[in-house]
Image (tube, grey):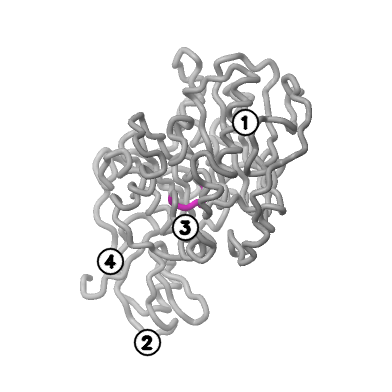
Amino acid sequence: MRKLVFAGLAAITAAVLTTVGVASADPPAASLVQVSSFGANPGALEMYTYTPAGLETGRPVVVALHGCTQSASDYYAHSGWPALADKWRFEVVFPQQSTANNSLKCFNWFGTADDTRGNGEAASVKSMVDKAIGDHGSDRARVFVTGLSAGGGMTADLLAAYPDVFAGGGIDAGLPAQCATSVTQATNCQQNNQNLTPAQWASRVTAQYPGYGGPWPRVAIWQGTGDYTVYPVNGTELRDQWTAVHGLSQTPTSTQSLPGGTTLTNYGDKVQLYSIAGMGHGTAVDPGTGTTQCGSTGAYFLAGICSSYYTGVFFGLDKGSGGTTTTPPPTTTTTTTTPPPPGACVSASNYAHTQAGRAHQSGGQTYANGSNQAMGLWNTFTVHALRETSSGYWVLADGQC
């Protein structure tokens, strides 16, 4: 599957779930449990939860949104979030999409009927949060959301629509908030640079809740440089969007080298961009029992680094109720407090660029990795200069090298 969206918009409905079950008490420990009744459900989603045994009151909640063709049980089985919930003591809510809403089971991140405040699927997720808090006395100030692909796009939309609900978000191979309002626009967002300024991207967030004056969520962005389903340019656009929302510069304050060929770029303590060299489309996992390991491989769960662990640390989930860190921070990183030097500038044939990993070809045409800028025919005769502006992100630089 190469698309998050599909042409059959007629299959997308706004039907309200009409089957109402009896609200249950705490679900059985250490299992994924469906919650049949959780309040208003205009998006016709299903709710599943994972609740560690004996979960105390006042603990956080993490909402985890699966990708297209996936289910709540897929994300439960592979993402690593349940094991972290056991270790750090929080509840995980797994919303589930249906084929009645979207034939590929993608969350509808590209439609205002579903991805805006008080409407459709976004409102259903908000009801799930309220249900989890009501059932377990969870901490309303520590509610977070994360998701893959279409789930990542919906995560960004939820952060924009409900900044008063979510303290932070983790966007894995996702898209900027309110990038699209139609299927055609969605495909364009997935594959192409939208050429918006950071301020223009930020305005798409702030317009979702006019008059909101509270703090904005912190955001961790995960992007593979070899992802040609949701192209790497989306990671940069998300960085531009959320740094601008927080009033931050797009110049990083520090960089770190992490396992799995991952480069972490920090923008103050509000925005993180994780760029994974060569990784395709999926959630990064690192099976094992080490401190920083979690998850298991599967379709769209790719080995390299445990993104859930690092996102959880960014959320502060590893800290006890008294603010004490319960899990030691990773020791495999190298940190610099100054911005990295400008990236390399290379002039070569389109063929040489693709062989070196600076570009890729599709249908005989060449495109720069990251920016996806068109470079012409894939051959040894067409020559262009490319400049790397961030790890794995190349832009045309003819005449500059």
Q: Is residue 299 visible?
A: no
- Residue on which the image places disc 4: 345
Tell me which label, 1 or 4, sits earlier in the chain: 1
Sequence-wise, the earlier of marks 2 and 4 is 4
What amino acid type is highlighted by mark number 3?
Answer: Ala
- Which residue corresponds to mark 1? 92
Can residue 130 be seen at all in this image of the molecule?
A: yes
Mark 1 Cα within 10 Å, few/some/many (few <14, many 20+)?
Answer: many
- Residue under label 2: 381
Where residue 254 appears, as percent x and y from the top left, is: 30, 40
Expressed as whole percent of the image width and height from the top left, the position of residue 133 reads 59, 22
Tell me the residue at 30%/44% (across/down). Answer: 244
Q: How many labels, in total?
A: 4
Q: State yes or no: discs 4 and 3 in contact (Cβ < 8 Å).
A: no
Gap in angstroms between the C-alphas marked 2 and 1: 54 Å
SS label for mark 3: loop
Mark 3 touches mark 2? (CB < 8 Å): no
Magenta stretch? 172-176
**Which mark lies nearer to you, 4 or 3?**
3
Sequence-wise first label, 2 or 1: 1
Is 9 positioned to the left or the right of 243 in the image?
right
Amino acid type at mark 1: Val
Q: Secondary structure at mark 4?
A: strand
Q: What's the amino acid at mark 4?
A: Cys
Most frequent secondary structure within the magenta stretch: loop
In the image, which disc is placed on residue 180?
3
Label 2 secondary element? loop
| Quarter of the rendering occupied by the C terminus | bottom left
Q: Could you tell me if the residues under marks 2 and 4 are in contact, i.e. CB atoms within 8 Å?
A: no
